Amino acid sequence: MSEHSSAWFPDDVSRLVVEASADGVLAVSGEGIILLCNTAAEDLFARPAADLVGSPFGFPIAVGASEIDLLLPSGQKRVVEMRVTATTLRGERLHVAALRDVTRRRDAEHALAAELERQNIVLAVAAHELHSPLAAISVLAHVLRDSETTLTRQRRVEITNSVIERTASLQALVHKLLTASRIDAVGERSVVERVPVLEVVLEQIADLGENAGHVRVSCPEGLVAAVDRAEFTEMLANYLENAFAHGRPPVEIRAGVKAGGVEVRVIDRGSGVPTSFVPHLFERFSRGPGSDRRSEGTGLGLWIVRNRARANGGDAWYELGWRQGACFCLRLRQAVVNRPEPESSAQLR
């Protein structure tokens, strides 16, 4: 407490009570000048009592509770809850302010509000995206049940295949939602390993079914990335899904070494992305405008790619492709090539 405190608190007990308070305590004159402060106030303002006492308080003084933003000398901001009472001491009108740092509480409240908003969006997106495939599966299942004796074998096969396709789309949706929740989870770590890029590219093309014939690949055989293999597979799968959903074939995958890293580009022959939407491409639940977008999707795929890429020490971005198509880029760390150490002269024969 400041050296002037004895003038205001001749009672030792009163001084001890103020000094022991966990809250910062200030006495402010009617002119807004700080007359005394306790140790907690020094810590809160990050300034010694010698600097505080005699200086302007700098905030409006009003009896009651309020909240102020306190800017420290370091530039850090603290959110402070202030409770002010008015009193008269030795014939002078004073305001006594009790100050409590609530920065962590406010940060936690904001984080909780943001998380609740994210969960609400997830539920809304899930409900919207689940509705159409579930409704279609229900209709097809009823057709199979109610028309069992009248359906031809070919028609039954077509309906069954349609059910399988819609079920697969539901599984993909659930997978993306679960992936998003894992990315948000604290403590998830990528398991970085040496991954042959061409091997993963060919595996993903094999999973494209009929679309596999519309993919061209340019990738050196010896290209190896330092990345979590499962996450790299997921990144590439999302890029390819995006190319066929929102672009046009043929789709080209180009991979190589650039500036000491591995770069993979997935290029389609569609109309590209509207310039105004490019800054929002990799945002969570971001779905662009345009009547040529034949599948809305969840708006999670590209967000997952960028998060996975950065977790592996890389990045993901968009460029205008060849002839106005879309080019989605991925940068990963290049794996160090292990070269055998040369034998020492003593070992040479």
Image: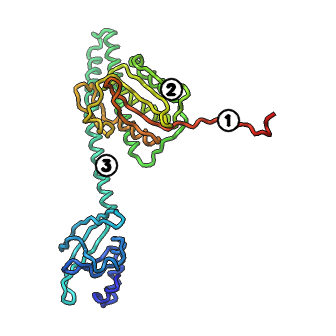
Q: Are marks 2 and 1 in contact (CB under 8 Å)?
A: no
Q: Mark 3 or mark 1, which is nearer the start of the sequence?
A: 3
Res. 72 image quadrant = bottom left
- Residue placed under numbered mark 3 in the picture: 115
- Residue placed under numbered mark 2 in the picture: 198
Disc 2 crowd, CA 10 A, few/some/many (<14, 14-19, 20+): some
- Residue placed under numbered mark 1 in the picture: 340
Q: CA distance from mark 3 to mark 2?
A: 38 Å
- In the rendered structure, the answer to whether residue 227 lies left or right of residue 276 reads right
Camera-near label (3 vs 2) is 2
Looking at numbered disc 1 in the image, what kind of residue is underneath it?
A: Pro
Looking at numbered disc 2 in the image, what kind of residue is underneath it?
A: Leu
The residue under the point 35% across, 24% down is: 322
The residue under the point 41% across, 20% down is: 215
Instruction: Residue 274: give x, y in percent of width and height.
Output: 26, 31
Q: CA distance from mark 1 to mark 3?
A: 51 Å
The residue under the point 18% across, 89% down is: 91
